[in-house]
Image (spheres, rainbow, N blue to C red):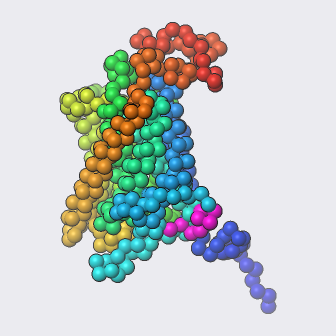
Amino acid sequence: MSSPPVSSSAVAYEAWTSLAVPDWLNKGDNAWQMVSATLVGIQSMPGLVILYGSIVKKKWAVNSAFMALYAFAAVVICWVTWAYKMSFGEKLLPFWGKAGPALGQRFLIKQAALPATPHHFSNGALETAEIEPFYPMATMVWFQCVFAAIALVILAGSVLARMNFKAWMMFVPLWLTFSYTIGAFSLWGGGFLFHWGVMDYSGGYVIHLSSGIAGFTAAYWVGPRSKRDRERFPPNNVLLMLAGAGLLWLGWAGFNGGDPYAANTDSSMAVLNTNICAATSLLVWTWLDVIFFKKPSVIGAVQGMITGLVCITPGAGLVQGWAAIVMGVVSGSVPWYSMMVLGKKLKIFQMVDDTLAVFHTHAVAGLLGGILTGLFAEPRLSTLFLPVTNSKGGVYGGPGGIQILKQIVGALFIIGWNLVATSIICVFINFIVPLRMTEEELLIGDDAVHGEEAYALSGDGDNLSLYKDDTTHHVTVSSGATQVV
């Protein structure tokens, strides 16, 4: 009797079908991780590029979109040249990894591993092994790169419409090197907060709290927009803003779903919780707008969507679905109050011009998410992901109460480091180039800064303002190298 034919599907999952398929490679995990990385990349570019270019006043559309685009490109080069290993490489300090390039094929095609992540009990026995996903290091490097990039893009939202572009070109690599890598290694790469058991599933602290605090700090040092822009700053294209917001929301499936480093049950839980919390937060924010201002605001709905996505991020794969709803209610109401009430009453929010309210949507929401994760983290889900195996939220009793304290301490470290590091970076840059645009550039906008404008509204390349108070109401012709068509 002849032997049955070998199934083609079985062969497809075998190792060594080619030299590019080693025995440790899981094709499903690798595919999902690369898709997740692409989804996160799309959140920045074109997602936030479109959102920023649309939500600002017409005369700042090009500058705002370009700040996001430039940050994305600059981070990619800095990341593979030195910053990846500072975030996920071998330990240099309890909060920092050793710098080095991630460019050679010998490093990039071997199995991914985070060398500082093995976690031990107090007696020295191994509690959790080194993180070694079943795909190549190249996948890990790119996945973490797009996270670093979006942190800078989010931060840019605080300083739109007045930061000198040359200063921004310097700020991006400096903040990535001396701020982002600190938080990433401390919480994810095997630093002291990672081993202490602070929970940050996918970047509530590493990305959102840090970029919100750093953005607010940078906004202080750069100074406010022009008086006219602060008084009237209408979005130039609300529908295009919604397109960018949609890319941001759906891209969050990769943002939170990719952080188990595998296509597994925890990944599925994270994606579902992400959408539950975002939807709840959007609805709550809209209801509050209707109740107190009598009108539903689509810009408000986008803010609520963002705060929900941010709030669930530190606990996406650690909490149950009902907790995601609770977190959505909190993220749709507390940042709403901080923005719409405290933002108009407290002097500090009047003094510091945070253009897109990144402090409220990312710092406040990220802090809330971190603390609520410490409250709601479910024990079994925590075991699936965290190095400290007995971790659980406060509502589950036992050692869960200490988890809230850990979350607060972790947040304070991120806040304090970003306040100091961002201030030093801004002061240093200001010695070399001005942080702020000239008064003429502030008056004119894109055409003065880039020689380009977003919309040609009359004639072939002629630009015409739609707003009576827009200082670019005169008819001009784009003078940039690339003509606006």
Is 129 rendered above or below residue 263?
below
Is residue 296 among the parts visible in the rendering?
no
Judge from the rendering whether residue 311 lies leftward or rightward of residue 176; answer left or right. Answer: left
Q: Residue furthest top?
A: 474
Q: Is residue 428 visible?
A: yes
Q: Which residues are magenta?
A: 105-113
Image quarter (top left, top right, bottom left or bottom right) of the N terminus: bottom right
Report the residue that reaches farthest toward the right: 2
Report if residue 111 lies within the magenta region: yes
- In the rendered image, the residue lying farthest to the bottom is 1
Of 256 and 429, the residue lying toward us: 429
Residue sitting at x 42%, y 33%: 432
Residue 168, by quadrant, is: top left
| Residue 209 drawn in magenta | no
- Identified at 34% across, 63% down, the residue is 94
* Above or below: residue 255 compared with residue 387: above
Taking 332 as reference, is 431 above or below it? above
Q: Is residue 391 above or below residue 249?
A: below
Of 152 and 337, nearer the camera is 152
Quadrant of image for the C terminus: top right
Q: Residue at x 46, y 41 (%)?
A: 172
Location of residue 348 (image quadrant): top left
- Within the image, what quadrant is residue 482 found in? top right
- The residue at the point 62 percent across, 60 percent down is 104
